[in-house]
Amino acid sequence: MTEYTRLMAGHFHGFRIDNCHSTPLHVGSYLLDVAREVRSDVYICAELFTGSEDMDVIFVSHLGISSLIREAMQAWGPQELSR
Amino acid sequence: MEPALQINGKDLPLDGLAIQSVVGKWIGPLTRWPEFLKVFANKGYNMIHFTPLNHRGDSNSPYSIYNQLAFAPDLFEPGTTIEDQHVQMSEMTTKMEKEYGLLSLTDVVWNHTAENSDWLQDHPEAAYNLHNSPHLIAAYQLDTALLDFSSNLRHLGYPTTLNSVDDLLKIMEGIKTHVLGGLRLWEFYILDVITLASNALNHWKTGPYNERDFAKYDLSTMSLQEKAKLLSSLALRDADYLGDRYKKTLNLGYCASYLFRLFGKYKETNAIDAQKELTKVMNEINLPFYKEFDSDREAILENTFNRVKYVRLELKKGEINERYYNHFCFANGSSPLIETLFTRLPHNERTLRHPKGSLAVANNGWIWANNPLEDFAGPQSRAYLRREVIVWGDCVKLRYGRGPVRPIIILTYSHRTTTLGCGSI
């Protein structure tokens, strides 16, 4: 996964972390360090469905995430995006 | 966090991003990309999000990656080497920025790999297997028994097409009889009373043990529950999480000392009473373990019922077939009663050297309202046994451990491509 991450950071300007909510924090931190060694300004967005803002903050601040994916089609109402 | 984004050296604020998603497996080879890129750029997009462009596994889902170090062969001219793939992709993303003003973004899939990933055969320890994760043995035996039952439905006289909840209830009765009935899953939870009592008596006879362990307790005035609680608190071992059958045990020295406190030294004449006493107290220790099993058994039945009901009756996925099915290949109609939670890696010359149990590996999936800081495949979780995991049959979950980060073992090889499997999604 280290080499995979290194390769992808070399090709692409940004990552969308798939299933960020089930990627252990220490794994995400480590692999993002690897990516940032290759491309220091890599843009990070994440699929992060934790169900709570407080938990989101833990992931966002720990990993340095710039944007979160939300699924409007999964939401229970127009005022709510799926979390 | 505000990223430092630039397009061709010009700053771009986060709010200025306009991202178009592209499904990599539908866009075609790199040689055709420029015609699409031109359209995206003209529309005003400035970043393209690609679903994973890596070599896909046999479900053909871009999120189920067969080889993380290679790109999908269908993006390139036939025969392109992996090294050349990387050269061409690098040229392409550079060209996207320089010529079209488009930044590029890729998905990264870190917590699972395609179930047919070739490297898994060399590194099953990267997954949660029955050797490194013996807490999954019970879940695996249940899973296998469910698949066996599924392939015997017709033979056993159960419906193979579900039309109503009544049909499903018949099948649930079958699961109770033919799956849970034969599996004796409670053996994963309880002490083996007969063996332990016999070993403890023997230990009492031969020693050594400390005669003072229970000296400060007046066992003769204690109720059975109190004695069970006391003996359990001192002697219970290997009870932290599930493992193989009868993993839980009692320290024999404490058992012998317990008998000494009640009966004095071993004598032929008091052996039978001692055995009765130990059996009673061990059965009492087992009581909460049986209750734990009962609760998990309820969860197994409830989750199985709900899942089959959802898939067979609410989604109308049709007849239950006898072959293992793949989450993303539903359309081809081969699917057992319920999805398997495990991938069974092939037994062959390469995999022969791995420790026993290594070739059964847990698939990844999703659990409603799960705490993301807890590992649902870890030893403290029974999510696989209770069948709470909504499984992705084409993805094997990767096992990283609890950290701090240890070196991640996998993926240091070069492997040529194979043909791709079935389609859809």
Image (cartoon, rainbow, N blue to C red):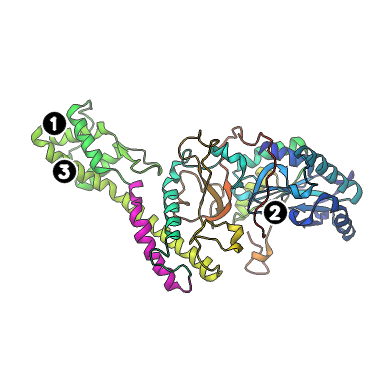
Parent chain of label 3:
B
Residue receiving disc 2 = A68
- View extreme (left): residue: B269
Q: Nearer the viewer, residue B54 or A11?
A: B54
Q: Main secondary structure of the magenta part?
A: helix
Please report the residue visible at 57 percent of the width from the left and 63 percent of the height from the top.
B333
Crowdedness near tag 2: few (<14), some (14–19) or many (≥20) residues, C-alpha within 10 Å: some
B188 versus B321 height, above or below: above
Identify the magenta region.
Answer: B162-189
Of circles 2 and 3, the one toward us is 3
What SS does tag 2 mark? strand
The answer to whether one can see residue B198 in this image is yes
Image location of residue B103, percent across then percent down: 83, 49
**Magenta-drawn stretch contains A46:** no
Residue B165 among those drawn in magenta: yes
Q: Give the labeled residue for mark 3.
A: B276
Q: Residue furthest top?
A: B208
At label 3, the amino acid type is Lys
The amino acid at mark 2 is Leu
